[in-house]
Image (cartoon, rainbow, N blue to C red):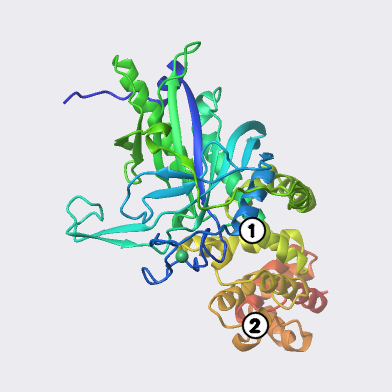
Amino acid sequence: MSTTVLPTYDDAVARYEPVIGLETHVELGTNTKMFCGCPTEFGAEPNTQVCPVCLALPGALPVANRAGIEATIRIGLALNCGIATWCRMARKNYFYPDMPKNYQTSQYDEPLCTDGYVDVELDGETFRIEIERVHLEEDTGKTLHVGGATGRIHGATESLVDYNRAGIPLVEIVTKPVPGLGARAPEVARAYVSELRDIIRSLGVSDVRMEQGSLRCDVNTSLNKSGEEWGTRTEAKNVNSLRSVERAVRSEIIRQSAVLDGGGSILQETRHFQEDTGDTRPGRSKETATDYRYFPEPDLVPIAPDPAWVAELKAALPERPSTKRARLREEWAISELDMQSIANAGAVELIEETIAAGANPAGARKWWMGELARRANETGVELSAVGATPAQVAQLQKLVDDGKLNDKVARQVLEGVVAGEGDPAQVMASRGLEVVSDTGALQAAVDEAIAANPDVAAKIRDGKVAAAGALVGAVMKTTRGQADAKTVRELILARLS
Ligand SMILES: [Zn+2]
């Protein structure tokens, strides 16, 4: 066993130039599977969403789902690809226990979409990532290994297969190799996947949840010395978070540079990214395309999208997420950095809808990025699932703007909203949290505060108006924070002038 001393990341990228490439699988959110009418709902009882077609029983024949083809074309168009006028599905032959057909219906030399690009912004710099192809295929089932400690096949006593996922449409998006990124390769890889996720989410064709596997990423990395040919690449499989994409590239750069420094050579292989350690472990040696014996799928007719239909789909594409962010940044008058953290928190649409429901931009941003983001973090849920809707947040902000709630009490109201006690106005009423601005009700508390603090009162009488703050504080205390501070201040000054 050799012990290799790993170089630092800075050392590695000083000596070698990385080339990366990304293959991303997106599970489409169609109601039914790609070649049969089975439902696609996530989390159903195992093997309840299957039929002769997706189980490949003898004589069953597939029929393509138009919605799957349409979604693939829209993804291709959003990634600036050309759309084929005629193409075919292909059989990719290999055995896998969770793949009942013994081949995957996929696309090979005739992909539906080709030659696009995505512009990725990172700290004000733009990196163009070229897209080689976007093709349509079907997902496999899932194998569950039980009886062992790790959930892997080693040590398991039995393996269970669930075919519910078999046949769900998958879109594979493959970049061209991306050279020239230097030390920024890991960050650009992450930013690319993030941008891709935003674009696909904006199309509404997938929920693109990395943690549920509806967006899965394989990351290719190779190293070469400056001026030399590109090196042999490895492929880190199924990297399932944005952070892991960055870590996988980074750790491969370090590992490969150690191998090359030691005079070794890189094996072309798939490697498994390890969440816990942040590095990759060897998997199988990588097959080449010829191993799969691809041939055109004889049971499906060719796909020949009408150019007029494609033009229609193109004209109806939604605003590009990066364009939208730039527009909103201007409208909301915030910095690039603020916009980035809003996007990272998944709050762009939520804030947008809150403003559309009547809140001002600063107010909408404050609640989502403050109190609600904190809560989402603490409870480990997406911001959109935190328990408050944009309409409720807008109503809360309106109550503050109207002086019925102050900021501090508004937090308590929001707490009630999140706990499911109703809309802000209902929570305010049922918890008795409305701000008291009725002068009659406040006058007694003001007089009491003046009587209890004669020295402060004397200062104010002498014209030191700033001292009124102490009395306002005293009144707020006796009214449990529910007094309207501005009214209290006016009452104090009126009494002591
Ligand atoms: Zn089926």
* Helix, strand or loop at mark 1: loop
Mark 2 vs mark 1: in front: 1
Give me the residue at 66% from left, 62% from top: 350
**Horizontal and vertical percent for residue 315?**
79, 50
Judge whether residue 156 can be spotted in this image: yes
Give me the residue at 62% from left, 59% from top: 67
* Helix, strand or loop at mark 2: helix
**Horizontal and vertical percent for residue 139?**
45, 54
Of the two numbered discs 2 and 1 on the same chain, state the one appearing first in sequence: 1
Return the residue found at the far top.
227
Give me the residue at 71% from left, 66% from top: 354
- Vertical relation: 461 (above or below) 97: below
**Where does the C terminus fall, quadrant-wise?**
bottom right
Identity of the amino acid at label 1?
Gly
Front residue of 249/481: it is 249
Drawn side of residue 29 relative to residue 245, left or right: right
In which quadrant of the rendered view does residue 188 lie? top right
Residue topped by disc 1: 204
Front residue of 17/444: it is 17
Drawn side of residue 126 relative to residue 296, left or right: right
Identity of the amino acid at label 2?
Met
Question: Crowding at label 1, few (<14), some or many (≥20) Cα neighbours within 10 Å?
Answer: few
- Vertical relation: 392 (above or below) 185: below
**Horizontal and vertical percent for residue 330?**
78, 48
In which quadrant of the rendered view does residue 294 lie? top left
Q: Are marks 2 and 1 in contact (CB under 8 Å)?
A: no
Residue labelled 2 has its Cβ within 8 Å of some atom of ligand 1: no
Residue topped by disc 2: 428
Drawn side of residue 443 relative to residue 84, left or right: right
